[in-house]
Image (spheres, rainbow, N blue to C red):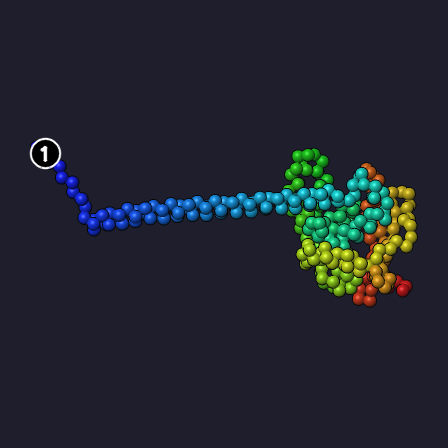
Amino acid sequence: RTVLCAVHPSDSESQESEQTHRRQRQQKQQQQQQQNRDVIVIDHEKLEEQLYQERFKRRLQQSSKKQLEALSNLPPHSDDPRFEDPKNVITSVLEALQTPHIPCPFFGYEVLYGCCTGGWKGVLRRSVGVDFVLLGEHEDDRTPEKREERDEDDEEEKEIFLRALSASMERDNNQFGILVGLGTDHDHEPLSSQTQNNQNDCKNDVADTYALEFPWDTLDYYDGTAWLECRLRHARTDQLLVVLGFSLQRREEDGRWLIDKMDWQDFREKYRPGIGREEWER
């Protein structure tokens, strides 16, 4: 005969076993919570990185689009009727120079350079010590292959030239600072050292430091050249500050006017009569 006996654990053993199971459950719960936290942290970091990359790409695209739009409007365009008139050429150049780094760096100087003949471009380059040919003006750039070889070098040379021209035009005690938003007698902070917002806030004030005047009509010699005089007057007092004389040439392919030479006569006490000039009757 078989006798079956049931063995019941003691109270102490039951409590110990229950505590062991409780600890195991707590450990599992803690491990699961830690895993969940790790997953959340990883997802959060990835999300932040993705959002940052998206914002960066969007800003880069907006900036690139803005600069391309600005550069696409660089004068003179063959389909732009403004540049059929020398006064419009000079007005566009001077307006662009007043805020030379809006809407993108060196924009005003690119406008100036784009509105010059090859001869005057050379004068600008030599004036800042950048005496080499830029922007596809090489005599041997007659084939697409050679133009492609020059593209990368042209961009580097162009940036060097624009930076040098900007530094020269915006330096202290410079009589040409009136053209680039430094005020009639350097009484304003240079636009190049301001932020975009500050430039927008003070743009109208700086632009009002001089008023542009054309005292005479354009003198057209009807041989593809013309002469135009303009005057910079103090916007509030109407005092004569500078007299500018421009020699212009008509571009053969589309008839647009380009700056071929500039004559500068300064009437401000600080700068008169100008570099290398004789005193005019005042």
Residue in the image at 79% along x and 52% along y: 95
Specify whether residue 172 is in view. Answer: yes
- Identify the secondary structure beneath mark 1: loop
Q: Nearer the viewer, residue 85 or 265?
A: 85
Question: x%, y% of residue 17?
Answer: 24, 47
In the picture, residue 198 is in which quadrant?
A: bottom right
Q: Which quadrant would residue 152 be assigned to in this image?
A: top right
Residue 179's quadrant in the figure? bottom right
Mark 1 closeness class: few <14, some 14–19, many ≥20 residues within 10 Å: few
Q: Quadrant of the C terminus?
A: bottom right
Q: How many numbered dots are placed on residues in this image?
A: 1
- The residue closer to the viewer here, 38 or 7, is 7
Judge from the rendering whether residue 72 lies leftward or rightward of residue 212; answer left or right: left
Q: Residue 8 at x, y = what percent?
A: 18, 44
Q: Residue furthest bottom?
A: 269
**Between 220 and 195, which is closer to the camera in this rendering?**
195
Q: Is residue 195 above or below residue 111?
A: below
Above or below: residue 270 compared with residue 248: below
- For image coordinates 77% across by 61% down, the residue present is 183
Percent x, y of residue 14 = 22, 48
Q: Is residue 167 visible?
A: no
Q: Position of residue 271 (x, y in %)?
A: 80, 64
- Looking at this rendering, what residue extends furthest in the left direction? 1
Left of 23 or right of it: where is 92?
A: right
| Residue where numbered disc 1 is placed | 2
Q: Residue at x 36, y 46 (%)?
A: 29
Q: Is residue 59 above or below residue 269?
A: above
Quadrant for the N terminus, please: top left
Amino acid type for the residue under numbered disc 1 = Thr
Q: Residue at x 63, y 43 (%)?
A: 61
